Image (cartoon, rainbow, N blue to C red):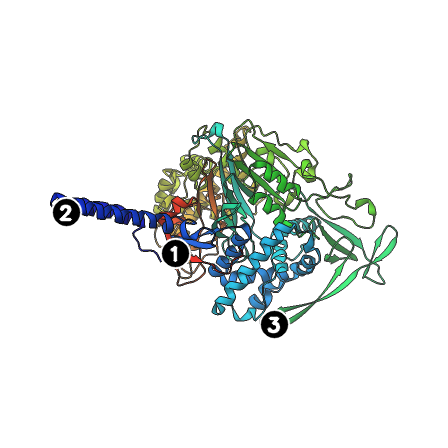
Amino acid sequence: MLPKKSMLSRLVETLHFARDVAFGESAVRRLSCLFLAFALCLCLASAVKAVTIPGAGEDVGRTVIYRDTWGVPHIYAPTPEAGAYAMGWAQAEDRPEELLKNLLRGIGEIAKVEGPEGMMSDLAARLWNNYDVSMRYVDRIRPEVRRMQRAYVRGVNDYYAAHPKDVPEWWGERKVDEYMIVAFARLFLYNWSVEQAFADLARGGIEPGFPKIKHGSNQFAVAPSRSAEGVAILAIDPHLSWWGVSRFWEFRIHAGDLRGSGVTLPGFPTIGNGHTDYIAWAMTTGGPDTADVYELTLNADDPSKYLHDGTWWQMTRRELTIEVKGAGPQKVTVYDSHYGPVIATKGGKAYAAKIAYADAVQASDAWYELNFAKDYRGAVAAAETLQFYPQNLMVADTSGNIYYQRVGRVPRRPAGFDWSRPVNGATSATEWQGFHPASDHLQILNPPQGYMQNCNIPPDVMMMDSPLTPDKTLSYIYGDMIYGPLNGWIGQRGARALELLKADSSVTAEEAISYILDVHPAGVDRWLAVLKEADAKFGTARRSDALYRTGIKDVLEWNGELRQDSSAALKYCYWRKQLLEDHGAKPGAAEVAARIDNLLSAAGKPALDLKLSDEQYQALLASFASAMKKLKTDIGSLDAKYGDVFRVGRDDVSWPVDGGGQQSLGLETLRNVDYGPQRADHTRWGDAGQTSTQIVVLSKPIRSWTAVPIGQSDRPDSPHYRDQAEKLFSKRKLKPTWYAPEELAEHIESREMLEGAPR
């Protein structure tokens, strides 16, 4: 641990001391004092260069992990392999249990630790043979990527060997192997494709029975022409659960040609989302259709056979044993068709899921291209591997380019079929015909608008007058229907991002940060206008109700922001929740709400009429009055603030938070937070949403800011167990990354040299 005062600060203090002493002595003694002081300063200056500047002096050629004052590791190493080794070591150090749990999830063995709640995760991993496929096809991975993966695995194993107390009992004596890393990538990344198959099945009227995973994200890019910084700006903002498999891990790395900053998941040896010295990239959910479901006609006499081109084909039977904590071994029988595993049966039919990634093991090849890219063309090369999962890839580089591609591994499908629901599997006429090259994907370089955003919305509303319309490509390349229609709609986050970006022709770094943390729900102003009109028409009769009178005054004076210190924001939240309970299931309710929201007006569509019927106005007020009574009953006072209820925290400690993520209540903001169920004290704590927000200014050198919702470490005794929840997330702030060594020098908390790293 370094002392609180940096060597540089001590050098300055020495100069001041020498000056003070010298002026109180004789000329000879003054010269002696000054000579001695300057000699000492030279020694201190040498120490500053050798010790304080990371990667310099005696640390040149060594593998060293410096941790900053947020506990974030900054890896300095001579080669990418040595850097990967240090990543494995540092991930195990920060997340000793979660790293191993991720690997168990990948190979389909997490239920033996988590119990019945992990059963379906294990079944999904086994349905697509994640571990076996990883071992079978690992040689497809390019050699330089495998070297990094093996170095990473060695770093993980060396850490646990050096710290046996950090190895949980349930892991036993086994070692982490390379195939586990590949299997985890398959589980996490290609789950998007699996969910597309499940959605096809659901649209066919059959619920798949697998739990749905919360997916969402924000991203926006600003070109130099609309940037006050004179360079491109990129916002990176994935929205996933804050716990479990999607709990991101933050780091910086300077390892030979591998240099960058960002986040990844424990179990991955690359920068997942972030930047290098030249390029920054972001990904949001929403992409081409990469999976299908085939309806199979079963043989009545032998249901293990299905009809295909006039003959009966035999399915392969697999007997799986899944160890479940507290329930013992569970036997599951799985059948595989030539399309893929059967995921449902009904009425003499079986439904087999075919995903484009059934044999894919080269996800790290795609990320390798990103991690070593020199400009946006590295992202193009990454997409050409066809190993990205279905996403919106958005990129900015230091050459001033902004670029977008709707990436994925997209099968070529025969025309004439509805691929959004189960298709006939009894004929080879529906068979895939290879894969589309990345050049077929929807993409754009440097749009003339000078900005673009994708907050899980169709490409036709990514910017004003977007050229990325459905007529430009095949429907299944344009998108999957997992979120709704392929075009003609927009969500609250996308609408708000458009409102902000199209109005700002000179975006500063500070404004970019404020935009990605914005807490004004799109459409809220129209809801307040409707409420004001309703009160003007029919509110007089309710003036005797003190709760109504107090509540309506507060809300109608509100600025529409979901701020933690706002009592009106909490009242608005209660009102929207009451409206949903009172009227959400009624015919036409969704259409009325959408008309009030009028989100497409942000994309240049005509504003819709706000006029409601007298009955509808009165219904709004009745729900408002009920909501104020409910608020008083729950909290005890109408003076309660939004942050009194909506919190961010860990274990038994929490802090107030801004923003929302409940789209059904019209409370979704760019500062996105999904809240868990109401607790006994009526508070609701965030459990998903913004997992690792980053703003990158593509200057030379690059500048960047980040925050995670909780903290870097999983160790309860660490000062970084929940420090970012208190000091950053609750305060709606990002921290500088201190990416450059000179920036980090003043913020080093610890230094750890790894002797076992490869040279």
Label 3: few (<14), some (14–19) or many (≥20) C-alpha neighbours in 10 Å: few
Tell me, yes or no, whether the two marked residues, 2 and 3, touch with CB atoms within 8 Å: no
Image check: 551 left or right of 678? left
Query: How many marks do you count on the picture?
Result: 3
As drawn, 621 above or below 223: below
Image check: 388 left or right of 163? right
As drawn, 425 above or below 1: above
Looking at the rendered structure, the kind of residue marked 2 is: Arg
Image check: 135 left or right of 574? right
**Disc on res. 327:** 3
Q: Which one is nearer the viewer's eye here, 133 or 475?
A: 133
**Which numbered disc flags the more N-terminal residue, 3 or 1?**
3
Residue at image position (35%, 55%) is: 636
Image check: 225 left or right of 389? left
Looking at the rendered structure, the kind of residue marked 1 is: Ser
Q: Residue furthest right?
A: 310
Tell me, yes or no, whether the two marked residues, 3 and 1, touch with CB atoms within 8 Å: no
**Disc on res. 29:** 2
How far from the left and from the top, in percent, is residue 367? 59, 46
Marks 3 and 1, Cα distance to the nearest angstrom?
44 Å
Report which residue position mark 1 lands on: 750
How far from the left and from the top, in percent, is residue 611? 50, 32
Query: Closer to the observer: label 2 or label 3?
Result: 2
Query: Closer to the observer: label 2 or label 1?
Result: 2
Marks 2 and 3, Cα distance to the nearest angstrom?
84 Å
**Which numbered disc flags the more N-terminal residue, 2 or 3?**
2
The picture quadrant where one finds residue 462 is top right
How far from the left and from the top, in percent, is residue 144? 62, 50
Q: Secondary structure at mark 3?
A: loop
Q: Secondary structure at mark 2?
A: helix
